[in-house]
């Protein structure tokens, strides 16, 4: 997860300094694919395996909210659902 975060973080730094719309589009696509992948992984991995990483995942999702709100909220809902199951 940390490698993925580092990749997105470095792409974000390029995105912030770039006035090139092609770079901005590529970053948005990368983030959208990463969030879709995360959502799929959350649905496939067992609850016990996820339980150790829920808070860390929520912290990472906070950093993506300003760029892609809809996909971040979808991932956050999946994480919160798993957290709810674990607490009950």
Image: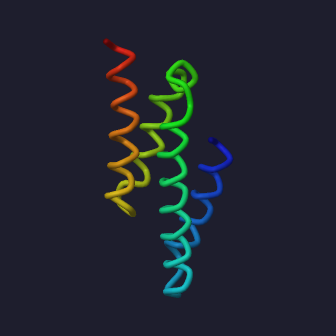
Compared to residue 74, the image places residue 48 above or below, namely: above
Q: Quadrant of the C terminus?
A: top left
State the residue in front, 76 or 66: 76
| Number of marks present in the image shown | 0
* Residue at the right extreme, as displayed: 3
Q: Residue drawn at (50%, 33%), measured in percent from left and top?
A: 56
The part of the image, by quadrant, that contains residue 11 is bottom right
Q: Residue 20 location, x and y as percent? A: 53, 87
Determine whether 88 is above or below 73 in the image.
Answer: above
Q: Residue at x 53, y 80 (%)?
A: 18
Residue 65 percent location from the top left of the image: 36, 54
Q: Residue furthest top?
A: 88
The residue lying toward the viewer, choosing from 6 and 41, is: 41
Question: Image height check: is 10 above or below 29?
Answer: above
Q: Position of residue 74 (x, y in %)?
A: 35, 48
| Quadrant housing the N terminus | top right
Q: Quadrant of residue 85?
A: top left
| Observer-nearest of 48 and 14 | 48
Q: Residue 26 in the image: x percent, y percent?
A: 55, 76
Is 35 displayed left or right of 10 in the figure?
left
Coloring basis for residues: rainbow
Residue 63 appears left or right of 6: left
């Amino acid at each position: 997860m940390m490698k993925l975060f580092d990749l997105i973080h470095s792409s974000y730094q390029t995105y912030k300094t770039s006035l090139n719309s092609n770079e901005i589009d590529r970053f948005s696509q990368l983030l959208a694919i990463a969030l879709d992948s995360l959502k799929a992984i959350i649905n496939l991995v067992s609850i016990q395996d996820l339980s150790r990483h829920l808070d860390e995942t929520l912290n990472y999702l906070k950093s993506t909210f300003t760029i892609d709100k809809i996909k971040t909220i979808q991932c956050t809902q999946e994480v919160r659902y798993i957290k709810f199951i674990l607490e009950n």
